[in-house]
Image (cartoon, grey):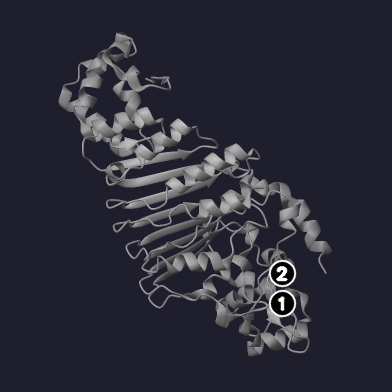
Amino acid sequence: MDLMFFLPSGDASFMDEGHLPLCNHGETRGIDSFPDELLLEIVQQLIHDDTETGYSMLSLSLVNRRFRRIALSMPSFWTKIPGVQHDMYKTFFERSEDLPLEVTITIKEKYTDTEIQQLDESLSPDSTRRWKKVTFLCDCICLIMEQREHSDSFSQVLSKFRMLQLPSLETARFVLHGDEFHEYKRQLANELLRYHDGWEAPKLKTLKLEGFIPRFFSKRMDSATDVTVNIDYMDHEVEYEPFSLAYFLQSVSAVENLKIVLNRPISSEKLYNYLPITYRRISRRLGLTDLDDTSTLVISDHSIQKLVSEAPVPDVTPDSLYKHLLITYRDEDSGRVVDREDHDMELDNQAYASEEWIQRIYLPGESLINLSIYPFVHLAKLKYLEYDLDPLCDIYLIMSVNRMLEIPTVEELVFRLNKVRKREAYDGLRLRMESSLLRAP
């Protein structure tokens, strides 16, 4: 039996008894025969299953008067507050009594003065002290608004999320989603990265960031033990920089489980052309597009033999091949930094054998950078580190972060290449990729 409800917007007075929706009693006759105790168990199960928002719980309270009576007798029924208008937030806040809250906040493109005032009430210390879990949702369209009045209200709202008192917060998630990042406003993007400035969250354990890398916390978050950074590959100018990620990780240096995800489809030839020629060649040589679905990267004997047969390299092992993928070579004669595949193979092999090329790393768009000035990050408690990549992401750029990490206690290191995401977006690029590979010098 499927029941569908359309919730009116605006004032929350529709929740009063006189505004309850009518229900077909023939459809609910079986449920009506259940004792209250059994219905209570059903409601509690719904609360546990509804992990993202509270919309389905709200719908359940509108089925009929009996369900409403049960819902009003359970403060825990109202602890998951969806990204709704202020009046609805206030209703959930009051009916949940003093229980911990799970809150979803949807950031809009434009706010009126009244809405900003209402947001202040929702972000008051009396409210945020009860937050156990918070999710911020922001569309990329908010970063490309051309009208100044939109930008002003958006910037004003972002500032509201700073300096929050969050004594009970255990889980925080911030999602930047959408497909319009290529025309972003840098000023707004910079403000977004600072949304957590001044947070007081002594119990924060789980932190999930999707679509961007924020600035480091102004105060170290030593309580954060589980961190996920899901970096969308949006544009060659705004994609993540290893420096940014390293500095952020310094502020959560007590992390025990760290997952770095780069899974944004590269949907245009312009973006694909910014990938290093080296990666485009090696990705085909190693057969990365032929990995099993969501498989962990294991460099097989077949892949090694395939690479060796096309470009002989002495003493190739999975470990040395891993280094070969990460590092570019510095020509000692000219001082130039070049991709290994673009260098003369004989000199390349000599350098590979002596490992002279490990001394330096080159980042696209940057000058030659000595490793000594990198922000090395000591993660003394890290046990699990996972890189979750698409086959076409820039493995060189993302893996340069790994060179900055000191992880003496890590027990499990996972590299995952996800073929499922590749199927969804990359199949249309196959011919263009092959053409680019054939044209590469």
Indicate whether 362 appears above or below 314. Answer: above
Q: Quadrant of residue 350?
A: bottom right
Name the image quarter holding the N terminus.
top left
Indicate whether 390 appears above or below 34. Answer: below
Q: What residue sits 29% from the left and 57% below the top?
A: 203
Residue named by callout 1? 340
Label 2 is placed on what type of residue? Answer: Thr
Local packing at callout 1 (Cα closer than 10 Å; few below 14, some 14-19, many 20+) is: many
Local packing at callout 2 (Cα closer than 10 Å; few below 14, some 14-19, many 20+) is: some
Left or right placement of residue 376 versus residue 433 in this view: left
Q: Is residue 51 visible?
A: no
Place of residue 195 in the rendered image (x, y in percent of width and height, measured from the top left): 46, 52
Place of residue 416 in the rendered image (x, y in percent of width and height, measured from the top left): 52, 61
Q: What residue sits 56% from the left and 42% below the top?
A: 152
Circle 2: element type: helix
Q: Is residue 214 visible?
A: yes
Q: Are marks 2 and 1 in contact (CB under 8 Å)?
A: yes
Residue named by callout 2? 278
Q: Which mark is residue 207?
A: none
| Inter-mark Cα distance, 2 to 1 | 7 Å
Label 1 is placed on what type of residue? Answer: Arg
Indicate whether 70 appears above or below 220. Answer: above
Indicate whether 94 appears above or below 245. Answer: above
Left or right placement of residue 132 versus residue 418 in this view: left
Circle 1: element type: helix
The numbered mark, 2 or 1, whose residue comes first in the sequence reads 2
